[in-house]
Image (tube, grey):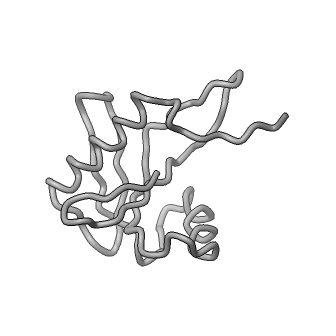
Amino acid sequence: MFFTIGNKKPIKIIPNTQAQVDGHPVLTYTYNIYSNVNLNDQTTLSRQESELLLQEKLDPTYLGYITFEDPGKVFTYTADGKDRLSSTEIEEIIENISHYRDHPRMWQFESNK
């Protein structure tokens, strides 16, 4: 997911899991947050995707992750990246992720047909 927050700060969100069950999207509860400075750089994207399951992320644009403990009610932000997000930025990111979660047709999935 790509969107901007605050004063036009570009953000990229990579869900920890992207899967389909019986043709329906499965929504994850943990979302990795990156400052989106290299939108079209395939090397950066590959590195970020390869680090998803690692305990420590080395990507300099990594900003931590948000866990949806109880969607719509309880969220946890873990700031284990180089920089921290403000509470206002976190709230805006949660609103954007929630919008995507509430409208799964916005997600693009490739068909293996």
Left or right of 5 on screen, residue 66: right
x 58%, y 68%: residue: 45
Badge count: 0
Q: In front here: 72 or 77?
A: 72
Where residue 59 appears, x then y in whole percent?
Answer: 47, 74
Quarter containing the C terminus: top right
Q: Is residue 62 above or below residue 30?
A: below
Q: Is residue 54 above or below residue 26?
A: below
Task: Find the residue positioned furthest to the right.
Answer: 113
Left or right of 89 on screen, residue 58: right
x 70%, y 25%: residue: 23
Left or right of 76 on screen, residue 50: right
Q: Is residue 33 above or below residue 39?
A: above
Q: Is residue 8 above or below residue 24?
A: below
Where residue 62 appears, x then y in whole percent?
Answer: 40, 68
Task: Find the residue positioned furthest to the top.
Answer: 22
Where residue 31 appears, x then y in whole percent?
Answer: 43, 48
x 49%, y 61%: residue: 55
Where residue 96 appears, x then y in whole percent?
Answer: 32, 44
Q: In front here: 32 or 13?
A: 13
x 41%, y 37%: residue: 100
